[in-house]
Image: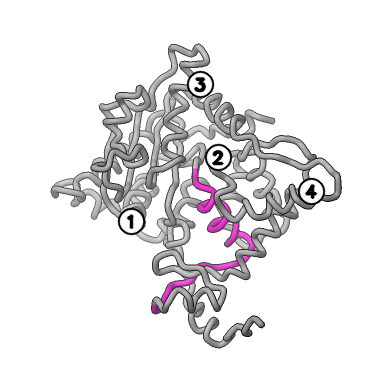
């Protein structure tokens, strides 16, 4: 017999919500300017910020925000939404967790919580609390997210969908039923900014989509499927049409490799004139010494013909501690105010 939850203990542990930083409320330009005159990671961040501002100033440049890791849960969620809201990015490539378990999850009205203490993880499990380092998620709320994904899948025509298409449906759902204005998924739908998750089912969405298929199969009905090849084709199509591109990358892994590989894919399709990504910034704590592809430097990526070696910067730092500075600096310099909206999402309509 399962023991009942200790609701008082659970409420105690989930008593302090994570507050997402607002880059519009502080001007980081003076500190970033000062850091440019320093050395080590400070100077790297200063140069990375300059490169991002170059992307914003280049009238031909389409900018992709590339997210891996848990910075959205840790307090950068509104930061990313602000970049999209103010036309400072033109596309997003991310892990499924960043989009579903974090952004869509909060769009439904749920929260992430600061861990005031880190008790035994078996205790957390007994209370149905999931842990990301020093951040908590209520598993019962996360299951609501799973069921909402199931609801969306059940409402769709049973055919193949790219992750971009399905995430657009999630954005539409939040417009009609959401509880949070500053959701990246919702804003992407409203501004025609495409979001791609090349490993989409490696997230809370996976549970809802599996149940959708199992339920439909048991009932002898057709079901929707995700088409990973369509993801690659669609993103490569945007790269070909965009020409000049810049990458603002948080972490590494599949999203980083996926966006970089569009250059090679375009060449395979016969577009020998496709440009490598002209600008690239990567903020990561990954160590390159083990040879792992996800932690490869941007210089290494240049050997594959993916990025330009001239306008790139690695910043080896925890992204939650430096992204607010970079984003606030770019926001307050205001180069986004005269940018043309790309609306790449509308190109598939």
Residue to which mark 2 is pinned:
196
Residue 125, given in percent of the width and then of the height, sits at 52, 73
Classify 80 as above or below 349: below
**Mark found first going from the N terminus, 2 or 4:** 4
Residue to which mark 4 is pinned:
155
Q: How is the image coloured?
A: one colour
Q: Looking at the image, which is closer to me, 176 or 105?
A: 105
- Taking the spot 47% from the left edge, 26% from the top edge, the residue there is 262
Left or right side of 116 for 92 = right
Please report contact status of discs 3 and 4: CB closer than 8 Å, yes or no.
Answer: no
Disc number at residue 240?
A: 3
Residue 333, given in percent of the width and then of the height, sits at 35, 45
Left or right side of 28 for 129 = right
Mark 2 packing: few (<14 Cα in 10 Å), some, or many (20+)? Answer: many
**Mark found first going from the N terminus, 3 or 4:** 4
Magenta stretch, residue numbers: 94-117
Q: Calculate the distance from the C-alpha at mark 3 to the C-alpha at mark 2.
A: 16 Å
**Mark found first going from the N terminus, 4 or 1:** 1
- Taking the spot 59% from the left edge, 35% from the top edge, the residue there is 228
Disc number at residue 27?
A: 1
């Amino acid at each position: 017999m399962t023991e009942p939850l200790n609701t008082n203990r659970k409420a105690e542990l989930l008593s302090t919500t994570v507050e997402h930083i607002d880059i519009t409320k502080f001007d980081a330009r003076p500190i970033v300017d000062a850091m440019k005159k320093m050395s080590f990671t400070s100077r790297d961040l200063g140069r990375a910020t300059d490169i991002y501002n170059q992307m914003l100033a280049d009238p031909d440049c389409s900018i992709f925000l590339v997210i891996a890791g848990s910075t959205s849960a840790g307090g950068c969620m509104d930061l990313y939404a602000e970049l999209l809201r103010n036309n400072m990015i033109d596309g997003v490539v991310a892990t499924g967790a960043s989009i579903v378990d974090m952004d869509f999850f909060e769009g439904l009205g749920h929260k992430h919580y600061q861990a005031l203490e880190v008790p035994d993880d078996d205790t957390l499990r007994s209370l149905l609390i999931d842990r990301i380092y020093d951040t908590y998620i209520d598993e019962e709320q996360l299951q609501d997210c799973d069921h909402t994904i199931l609801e969306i899948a059940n409402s769709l025509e049973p055919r193949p969908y790219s992750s971009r298409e399905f995430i657009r449906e999630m954005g539409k759902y939040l417009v009609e039923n959401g509880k949070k204005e500053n959701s990246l998924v919702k804003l992407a739908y409203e501004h025609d900014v495409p979001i791609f998750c090349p490993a989409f089912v490696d997230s809370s969405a996976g549970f809802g989509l599996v149940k959708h298929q199992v339920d439909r199969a048991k009932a002898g009905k057709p079901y929707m499927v995700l088409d990973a090849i369509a993801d690659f084709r669609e993103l490569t199509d945007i790269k070909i049409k965009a020409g000049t591109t810049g990458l603002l990358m948080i972490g590494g892994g599949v999203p980083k490799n996926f966006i970089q590989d569009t250059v090679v894919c375009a060449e395979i399709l016969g577009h020998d004139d496709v440009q490598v990504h002209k600008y690239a910034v990567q903020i990561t704590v990954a160590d390159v010494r083990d040879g792992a592809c996800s932690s490869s430097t941007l210089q290494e990526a240049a050997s594959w013909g993916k990025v330009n070696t001239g306008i790139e910067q690695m910043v080896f730092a925890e992204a939650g501690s430096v992204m607010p500075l970079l984003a606030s600096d770019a926001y307050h310099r205001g180069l986004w105010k005269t940018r043309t909206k790309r609306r790449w999402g509308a190109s598939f309509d």
